[in-house]
Amino acid sequence: MTEAAKELGVTNHVIRRLIKGGIVPAKRLVEGAPYQIRAEDLHSEPVQVAIMQKERPCRGNSTDQLSMFPST
């Protein structure tokens, strides 16, 4: 997982989230063993899209949203 994170320039937490989300295919030979991730899977389109989405804010830009601190 650490090597995969380093390859993609992200944290281990991001790799774990991608594995749990089914975006990065990974296997464990036995329970508790490190994940095995194929290098070519790291550069697949779904993985690249998921990594690019992490950079975006998690909130939308709504024109109908009221400001918490309206200027008066």
Image (cartoon, rainbow, N blue to C red):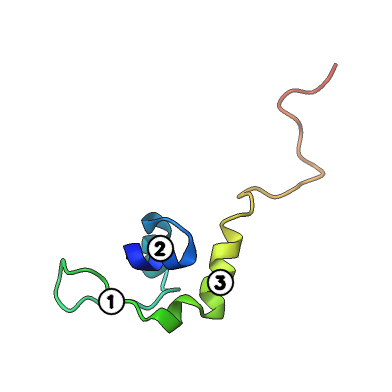
Whole-number angstrom distance, CA of label 2 to CA of label 1: 13 Å
> Going by the picture, which residue comes out furthest to the right?
72
Q: Amino acid at mark 2?
A: Ala
Label 3: how many Cα within 10 Å (few below 14, some 14–19, many 20+): few
The residue identified by callout 3 is 48
Are the two marked residues, 3 and 2, in contact with CB atoms closer than 8 angstroms?
no
Quadrant for the C terminus, please: top right
First along the sequence among labels 3 and 2: 2
Q: Is residue 51 above or below residue 28?
A: above
Q: Amino acid at mark 3?
A: Gln
Q: Amino acid at mark 1?
A: Gln
Q: Is residue 15 above or below residue 41?
A: above
Name which quarter of the figure residue 33 lies in. Answer: bottom left
On the picture, is 10 further left or further right than 59? left
Name which quarter of the figure residue 5 lies in. Answer: bottom left
On the picture, is 53 further left or further right than 28? right
Q: Nearer the viewer, residue 22 or 52?
A: 52
Whole-number angstrom distance, CA of label 3 to CA of label 2: 13 Å
Task: Name the spot of residue 14 as percent of width and height, x first.
Answer: 43, 58
Label 2: how many Cα within 10 Å (few below 14, some 14–19, many 20+): some
Q: Nearer the viewer, residue 65 or 12?
A: 12
Task: Name the spot of residue 9 as percent of width and height, x first.
Answer: 48, 60
The residue identified by callout 1 is 36
Q: Considering the numbered disc 2 on the image, is that residue within a helix, a strand or a loop?
A: helix
Q: Nearer the viewer, residue 66 or 21?
A: 21
The residue identified by callout 2 is 5
First along the sequence among labels 2 and 1: 2
Q: Considering the numbered disc 3 on the image, is that residue within a helix, a strand or a loop?
A: helix
On the picture, is 33 further left or further right than 71? left
Q: Considering the numbered disc 1 on the image, is that residue within a helix, a strand or a loop?
A: loop
Label 1: how many Cα within 10 Å (few below 14, some 14–19, many 20+): few
